[in-house]
Image (spheres, rainbow, N blue to C red):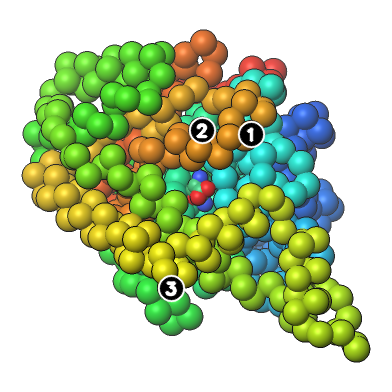
Amino acid sequence: MDREVLTLSGLRAKLAENPKFLYEYIEFIYDVIDAVEGKVKAFITLRSKDDVLREADRVVDKLIEGRAGRLAGALLAVKDNIVTKGLRTTCASKILSDFIPPYNATVVDRILREDAIIIGKTNMDEFAMGSTTENSAFFPTRNPWDLSRVPGGSSGGSAAAVSALEATAALGTDTGGSVRAPAAFTATVGLKPTYGLVSRYGLIAYASSMDQVGPIGRTVTDVSIILDVISGRDVKDATSTHSRGGYREATVEPFKVLHPKLRVAVIEELVVGGVEKPVKHSFLRTLRKLESNGIDVIWLNMPISRYSLPAYYIIAMAEASSNLARYDGIRYGLHESVEGRPWYEVYTNVRTRGFGKEVKHRILLGSFVLSAGYYDEYYLRASKVRKIVRDSLLAILREHDAVISPTMPVLPPKLGERIADPLKLYAIDINTVLANLAGVPAISIPSDIVNDLPVAVQLMGNEFDEVRLVALARVVEGIINLAPLVPPLVRRYV
Ligand code: GLN
């Protein structure tokens, strides 16, 4: 397949010329899926080619008549914690393994209204709790760049599908890094919007004060096109707010929205410490490239960032323990008859059978940090740290265009390497959780290939200023200028 059409924007241009090309494109995607999905295992539920071709007929007609939407013909993979009407949505949990939602999430309605076609529902860590997709109750997903390694998580299936050319782009969700981590490990672009920019209606809640839906694509422009579609006020989510729009446009002419003199901050604490040597060296090389292209790089400190990881995990687990109380075995999901039995016996049985180890672990810890004797010591203190993190980050962002760091401090780990020790696993979220605690937007873009594995940088921007963030990310993407990133596994298809 012609490399041009591997991106969403390339596909759009091609379909504008020749609407019937969509059939050829669908054949191509399913050929790739037939060849690699057995190894990558990105999808929990994959739609049949016949179903997709049937929807394509309608899209092709609209293209011919010139009334097709902004995502016409895009084959989008949707993370399995975003509800899709009539299409099984499991959250990668046994407790929801047969759940067929009666309604669509707002983001799903919005992509469908713009004529995207959903190709399937992607694998993830159960209830989005994890950073490697190994916590899925069904099977782990593998990294298309090296099948012995994890694709990152928790939106690992979405990122792996995009990376392995099994989808045009994807939706993921990000509570503490779950869009950016898998984007970094698979050489794709992942954007976590400002908290409130995208509706959470129909996103199965993990930690509601931090959860956001975000796009994963092959380029900064591609994720911006999707952000244009999914962002904006929704009456069904009281925390959602108006979107300025114009994200794609900002990537086409970035200097219309940026000052020519760009200043990016590096928070020293995010680069020293736990960052593996090859990642650190690569990051420093990237900084030099930016500097030689006229971008000012300013090093500074943010001492409170030391506490961001524990604060994040305390808050996320506390909220999860409350959000997950709804899985009672009665209303939906895994079910047992209550006939002649006390309710707590049913409740206990269903939850014991339905939840995986990590989910139980977090419900227990979350309930503990909220308990009467420990609330002040844990939850309240974590909330105070969160406030200071937010104030410090916003102060830095007032003076700089963005904060830049490695997205992940490590190269993609081998399967099994981190999962045994929760603290070792939580540690790799060190650079991503800041944006969720503060509510600001952040984007991960590929910056290098080291030892044949992807490395990425993260840019955090000011709240509700995604226009400038994507414009800057486009400039950085241009300076880094990597060749099109296709993993060896699928290179023979392009
Ligand atoms: N790894 C983090 C966690 O497990 C982030 C997960 C996410 O963003 N959904 O909480």
How far apart in space, not on screen, are marks 3 and 1 (Cα)? 31 Å
Q: Is residue 27 left or right of residue 288?
A: right
Query: Residue 456 at x, y = what percent?
Result: 41, 28
The residue where tag 2 is placed is 424
SS for dot 1: loop
In this picture, is 93 found above or below 20?
below
Q: Compare marks 3 and 1 and give the one earlier in the sequence.
A: 3
The numbered mark, 3 or 2, whose residue comes first in the sequence reads 3
Residue under the point 38% across and 38% down: 430
Q: How many numbered badges does the structure rendering display?
A: 3
Q: Nearer the viewer, residue 190 or 339?
A: 339
**413 vs 453, nearest the viewer:** 413
Which residue in the protein does label 1 denote? 420
Amino acid residing under circle 3: Ala
User: At 75% across and 75% down in the image, what residue appears?
Assistant: 347
| Whether label 3 touches label 2, CB < 8 Å | no
- State left or right for residue 129 relative to residue 29: left
Query: Residue at 62% across / 35% down in the picture?
Result: 419
Tell me the CA gap for discs 3 and 2: 29 Å
Q: Nearer the viewer, residue 456 or 16?
A: 456
Q: Position of residue 119 (x, y in %)?
A: 70, 51
Q: State the residue position of label 3.
A: 372
Quadrant showing the N terminus: top right
Q: Is residue 236 above or below residue 95?
A: below
Label 3 packing within 10 angstroms: few (<14), some (14-19), many (20+): few
Give the x, y percent position of residue 259: 11, 41
